[in-house]
Amino acid sequence: MADCIFCRIVAGEIPADKVYETGTVVAFRDVNPQAPKHLLVVPKRHIATLNDLDEQTIALVGDMYLAAKQIAADEGFAESGYRTLVNCNEDGGQDVFHVHLHLMAGRRMGWPPG
Ligand code: AMP
């Protein structure tokens, strides 16, 4: 999608601080971090929201979590802990309409989230 910022990051058309990549997903640091460590894991394929997942694309969710697990180990916060979340549509607080997994660590997370 030419007008999708995360598609453009995946394509290397705009810069991002990429930390991890597989054949199906890319992870990079969030430009506006909400925790000392805040990364985004995105599928290379454009999927707008969780609502758009289907039988053909659901395996990407597993790929995103395997990436998050590996990044947590690589960045050294697997044992201290971390939070993953996906925002969906307006009430979920989604701003970028290309599915992404937030991976946050480095501080104690509050509950419930705001
Ligand atoms: P969401 O509100 O769940 O859609 O999250 C979108 C996230 O993308 C926010 O945390 C933004 O800070 C982040 N973001 C937006 N543009 C970029 C970018 N060019 N590089 C890295 N992170 C970005």
Image (cartoon, helix red, strand yellow):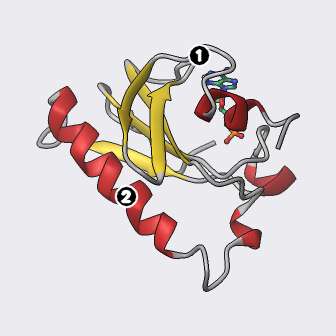
Residue in view at x 77 percent, y 56 percent: 48
Tell me the quarter of the picture where residue 47 sits: bottom right
Q: Which of 61 and 85 is in front in this view?
A: 61
Give the label on residue 31, or none: 1
Which image quarter holds the C terminus?
top right
Q: How far apart are marks 1 and 2 (CA)?
A: 21 Å
The answer to whether mark 2 is within 8 Å of ligand 1 is no
Pinpoint residue 8: horizontal percent, then vertical percent: 71, 29
Horizontal side of 9 relative to 101 (left or right) equals right
- Other residues around mark 2 within 10 Å, as few (<14) / some (14–19) / many (≥20): some
Pinpoint residue 70: horizontal percent, then vertical percent: 23, 45
Q: Nearer the viewer, residue 30 or 42?
A: 42
- Ligand 1, seen in the image, is in the quarter at top right
Looking at the rendered structure, the kind of residue marked 2 is Tyr
Q: Which of 6 and 82 is in front in this view?
A: 6
| Above or below, comparing residue 6 to residue 56 in the picture | above
Which image quarter holds the N terminus?
top right
Specify whether residue 111 is in view.
no
Residue in view at x 59 percent, y 73 percent: 57
The answer to whether mark 1 is within 8 Å of ligand 1 is yes
| Above or below, comparing residue 65 to residue 97 in the picture | below
- What element does badge 1 sit on? loop
- What element does badge 2 sit on? helix
The residue singled out by tag 2 in the image is: 65
Precedes in sequence: disc 1 or disc 2: 1
Pinpoint residue 32: horizontal percent, then vertical percent: 60, 17
Pinpoint residue 49: horizontal percent, then vertical percent: 74, 60
Residue in view at x 59 percent, y 53 percent: 86
